[in-house]
Every structure is written in C-alpha cells, then in structure tokens.
Amino acid sequence: MLKMLKRGLPIAVLLLFISTSMNLFADPKAKRKTASESSGAASSDSYMGLTGEQLWSNNCLRCHNIRPGTMYGNAQWDVIVHHMRLRANITGQEQRAIVEFLKSAK
Amino acid sequence: MKRIRHYCLAAIIQGALLTVTSLVAHAEDATTDGYVTRKEYEDLKSQMLAMKKELDALKKETAQKQGNAENQALVQSHKEVAPPESSQDQAVADTHKQVATEAPPPVVESEGSLLGTTKFLLAGWAEAMFEARNGNVSTFSASLNPLFLWELTPKILFDGRLEIEPSGGGTNVNLVNAQISYLLNDYVALGVGEFFSPSNVFVERFEPQWINKLPDRPIGVYHGVLPNISVGAQVRGGFPIGPTRVDYALYVANGPTLNTFSARTAGTLDFNSYTDNNDDKAIGGRVGFLPIPGVEVGYGFETSKPGFQGTTFADLRALVQSVDLEITRNSDLLKGRISLFSQYAWSKVDHAVYDPDGSLGFGPLPLTAKRDGGYAEIAYRPTQLDIDLLRNLELIFRWDHLSGDPSGLGDSSETRWTLGLNYWLSPSTVIKAAYEWDKPNGERNRNALFFQTAMGF
C-alpha cells in the first residue's frame, strides 16, 4: 500500500500541475485585463493590468490567508507590505498598488 | 375777524404742541446719555443676524466647492482603479460617487506629525501544541515569536525576530533573524545581517506556524538538506516579463560547517553554525518563475567550502540544490481553494576520507556524501460554501522524506505521511489536529498525534 502511494504521489503531483496549467482550477476572480483595457488607468493602484485588489489577492494568497484592509492602520500596512515585498519579491509598483488598495479598502 | 382769531388760536396750539413734542423728544435724547435705543438695538441685531447668515452661506459655498473638487478627484481615481464592468459595478461606482459627494471634507491626517516619520510594528506569531509521539513521552509546548519591523524611511527597513519558548526549568530566547534592508529601486533590494536563506523557499515563506498548515515542519527541507538561516548579504527582487513574472535572490554568507568527528554524521552539513570556519564564503540564491497568478516554480542553490580552515577538508566543496512548486488557486468546480506546496532538495559534498588515521575510532571512512529530502503537501478549503463551519475547515495531506546519513552509520532514511484538519477562527488564527505516520527504516514506528493552536499578529 505504502509503495503504491510512493509511486502514485509523483504522478498525482504531475497531473495536478498539468491540470492547473490547463486552467482546470481557473480562478474566477483573477480576471487578467488586457493592455487596451488598462491603458486608461493611470492610477498607481494598478500594475500589469491587475488592480491593487487582484495583486493583493494573488500575491498574499500564494503563502497564507489574506487579511482585510481594516485589520491594520495605514502606517502599519506601509510597514507590513514593505516587509512582504522583501519576502515575496514583489516589485515596487505592486507594493504601491497593494498598499493603496488596502488603505482605500477601509 | 373771528375767523382770523380762530386761525391764530389754531396756529398757537399747533406751535405749542410742536414745541412740547420737540421738547419731549429732546428730553428723551438727553436721557439716553450715550446708550442705544431699543429700536437701534433691534436694528443692529437684525443687521448682525443678516451678516451672520451671509457669512454662513459663504462658508458653506466655499467648503462645498473644495469638497466637490476633492471628491471629483476621488471618484475619478475610483473610476481609474476599477472601471465598472457591469451594471452592478456601475451601481457601486454610483454609490461611491454619491457617498463621496455627500461626505464632509476629509480631516487632514496629523498622525505623521504627531508620531514622527519612522514606523514601528510589532508583529509575529504565537503557538501552543500538544504532541504524543510513539516512543516519547507526550508533552505540551508553547512559543512566542515576536517580529520587530521598523521602517526608518520608505526605503529602509529593519526586521528582526526572536523565538521565546519554555525549556526545562527556564526559557530559551533565540535570535532567529536580524536584517537591515534597503530598496534600491522597484526591482532591486539589498539586505545585510541574519536572514532566512533565500535558497530554501519553505523557511522564507511557510515556516511561521500560522502559515505552515501542519503542526510540524517537513524534514528534508527544514533542518535537513538545506540551510535555514544565513548570515551575510543579499540582493533580491522581482521583475515582469510580459504577462509573467520572475523573482530572484542572490546571497553571500558564512555557509555551513562539515561534520567530520563522528561516524554517524560524517559528511553531513551543519547549517546551524552561524559563525564561519574559514575564509571561503557560501554563495547561493533562488530564481522563481510565475507563469500565471497563483503558480510559481523555483530553483535554489548554495555552493560552499564547509571544511575547517587548515584541515584536509578545507578544499572540499559542497553543493545543495532545491526545486519547488507552489500552486494556490480558487476553483468554482471544487467550491473552494486548493493549495499545493512541494519542494525537493539534494546535497553533495566532494569525496573525502573521514578519520583517515583512525584516531577517532571509525576511520578511515572514504565517502562522497550525498543526501536528499523533500515534501509535497496538498490542502483544500471549501471557501465558497455558505456554511461558516464548513468554510473554515481545511483538510491537509503531506508526504515528506529525508534520506539516511551518508555514512550509513547514522540515522536511517525517514518517510512520513501526515493527515491534518484545521479550523480557522480568523485569517491568521488556526486550530490544527493532525496524525503522522512515521516509520524510519529498520526502526519501530514513531507515529504522532498533534493538536496545535497558532495565531499570527
């Protein structure tokens, strides 16, 4: 039984990866906007066609549950997202867009 | 003549009346002696009220003009951030507009001037656990892990973490990391100090117990084949390539120490020795690729000379490598969120003869030390269900493995299977229960039951 599981696990992992890549688990909320759609958005709360909310969801959820904007004050969010930028290697634009979203979400 | 007399009499009477009236009037004026009359008072009062009314109207008009200008900017900003995609979005945008228009002008935030320009935050996490492992006495444990974050300027951040836990008759306090970092630009950050090793994605991202989904950590990547903490300097960041993104980290650090004094551990690397044992410095890093949001694949490495300076092991080179895959996706099909985290690492130390003259009692032992280990974890949380009780549950399954000591004389290989069930009280507070099947080769089982509560703050 254990041997079967040992053999099966890599295959299961591979299948999961392929199915994910084929968008079986398509995220309905992570709609990627085209460049033309986002061309008019000059606000800093957007990056690569993604809004601050989408960047917040995409980046934070990669590791842990997302915490709502109301959970911390504006100055605290500045520090937290600065720290997370270093840990998760997000870009400066993403950092600013996420902070702007979290502050406006109050 | 009689008529003329009547006219004269009437004129005299009128004149007398006028004189009396004038005298009375004069008398009244004389009695005021600088005081205003009731009439004047009433006139002044009405004038003042009229002026006050005008002033209020002017104030209101000015404030409204200013508020409208700001609200227009806010509404425009809202429009730019999230252009309405449906009638519902349009309704929300309209509500925003209405609320913004009706809202009083914002009060200027004086927080910065009151508290200074630096920003300090005490974050971190705490946990309490019960563990009953076959062959060991069952025990409760607890730890507090405060994380000190100090942003001196928007570019400079200090982050340092302690681990405080009861042990024996006292309390252990360990410095986990202490790093000063500087944001060079949008894509490059520099850091110096003691930091989580970028070559090991598990310790960088999933090690805190409110993030790690199971009560214990995977062997192989945690205190196994890969470094956890490095003391040195690093450069890191991320940048977009078309719709995808690449992140990177490169560091130079003291590096591990080679174990040479025991047959059990000969050829293994000690990553918990934070001071260096030679002039060579370890070089390592990781590159990650994000093809779509929520999916990342990565490769990490570290190369070093781990032998003590001046010994026959000084020129040996060690190479550790790691591949990892992280997927987190929401799925309508599965009515929830599925997460897959996996990492596999392997290490190699150049060929050497340990205890060549037999003075340590186990040599000569010729060895090319190789080790490997890793884990794969899958978790499912039904986040789209309407029932709170079910929505807060998360089911986790993990496989993890660590090969035996390279000499064949120490610990044998170990493979574990763990099943866990979590209940989330808040986004960063969790109650975990897990059972672990653990049977190292040639030994009796070390199966374990865990209960743990962890809270991130």
Image (cartoon, grey):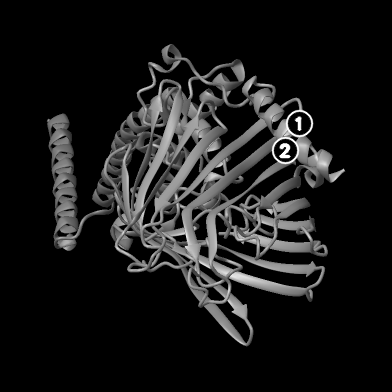
Pointer 1 chain: B
Pointer 1 residue: B335
Pinpoint residue A31: horizontal percent, then vertical percent. Answer: 56, 22
* Amino acid type at image mark 2: Thr
- What residue is at 17 percent from the left and 41 percent from the top? B14
Residue A29 percent coordinates (x, y): 61, 26
Question: Is A82 on the left or on the right of B184, as rendered?
Answer: right
As displayed, is residue B140 above or below residue B430?
Answer: below
Q: Residues within 10 Å of mark 1 (few under 14, many from 20)?
A: some
| Quarter of the C terminus of chain B within the rendering | bottom right
Residue drawn at point x = 74 percent, y = 41 percent: B381
Residues under numbered marks 2 and 1 in contact, where contact means CB atoms less than 8 Å apart? yes
Residue lying farthest bottom? Answer: B169
The residue type indicated by label 1 comes to Lys
- Residue that carries the numbered disc 2 in the rendered image: B383
**Horizontal and vertical percent for residue B194?**
39, 61
Residue at the image position 70 percent from the left and 56 percent from the top: B413
The one nearer the camera, B125 or B404, is B404
Image quadrant occupied by the N terminus of chain B: top left
